[in-house]
Amino acid sequence: MNRRRPLSALSLTAAILTLTGCAAPQLAATGAAPPVIEHIHGIAPDPRGENYLVATHGGIFTLTSEGAVSGPIGGHDFDAMGFTVHGDVLFASGHPGTQTPPNLGAPNLGIIRSDDYGESWSPIALNGTTDFHTLTAAPDGTLFGIASDSVDVLISADNGDTWSTGAALSAADLAATDNGVYAAAEEGLLLSTDNGATFTPVPDAPLLYTLDAQPDGTLAGIGTDSALWVQQPDGTWESLERLQGAAQAFTALAEDRFLVVDDRGIVEITPDTTTVLAPAR
């Protein structure tokens, strides 16, 4: 295993500021007059098949496995700062765009939901008051998030309708598995086994600022050393490769198969190959 020494908490703070700011690479979308997508905040597999959903400053776009980008889906131009998918349901948060219906909330969207893969959206909770920069769904559908104006972990067990407050922590990202909810925090990787009420350190983990769960429940993420780290079934960690620049978005597609947005654009990484699906402009 190629283990690297974690960087300081100060380095993680700088990484958090980079991750939550609007500094992602720009990608050209397909079409007669191709729009440009920029400020990528999240990326996830499309529940309908082989494509991917890309949450950006100007809406949610579709990326095919061949690298073609189109959108925004449904013409919705809201700034999707927080984004997650559970089953066939999309959840998002952020800020309205110029064409966003007023009922979704302003100046903050709170939690909005789509049951038709992004074609239409409904307001769910906290609309107009809260902007989630971190949002993730557990296997059982429990939602966990952190709002931009708070350090408290927020929890919803009813599809986002109501929210309770958990632990306060400085975290850049969250990921949930059957074992609990994990946080990529300044003090290291943390685990909560009581639904976000308290967190304890995970021993020997690298210092991460993006985080996601693989299908088998192990974790993967980008470290403050700019490396992609993958947790093994025995709990140890392996470094696959170094990124080019900071990761703006990250997701685990399958076991040992990942998508990352860095200075190259949207990149698919496996232990054996690295493929730029959509290059940065």
Image (spheres, rainbow, N blue to C red):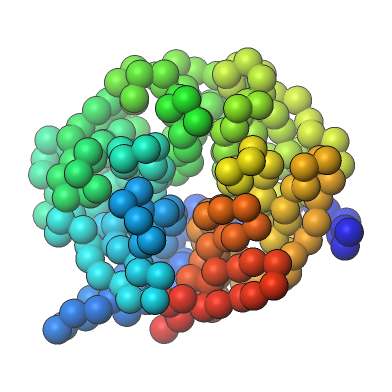
129 relative to 189 in the view: left or right: left
- Residue 60 position (above or below residue 142): below
The residue lying at 24 percent from left, 48 percent from top is 117
Q: Is residue 178 above or below residue 48?
A: above
**Horizontal side of residue 206 vs 166, given as left or right:** right
* Rendering coords of residue 110 (x, y %): 30, 34
Left/right placement of residue 107 relative to residue 183 reads left
Residue at left 14%, top 84%? 32
In the rendering, at what x and y percent does residue 92 appear?
A: 33, 42
Quarter in which the N terminus is drawn: bottom right
Judge left or right: residue 35 versus residue 137: left
Image-quadrant location for residue 103: top left
Q: Nearer the viewer, residue 110 or 267?
A: 267
Q: How far across and down, in percent of the image, does residue 34 sit?
A: 21, 80
Along the viewing direction, whichever of 106 and 89 lies nearer the viewer? 89
Q: From the viewer's perspective, is residue 5 above or below residue 215?
A: below
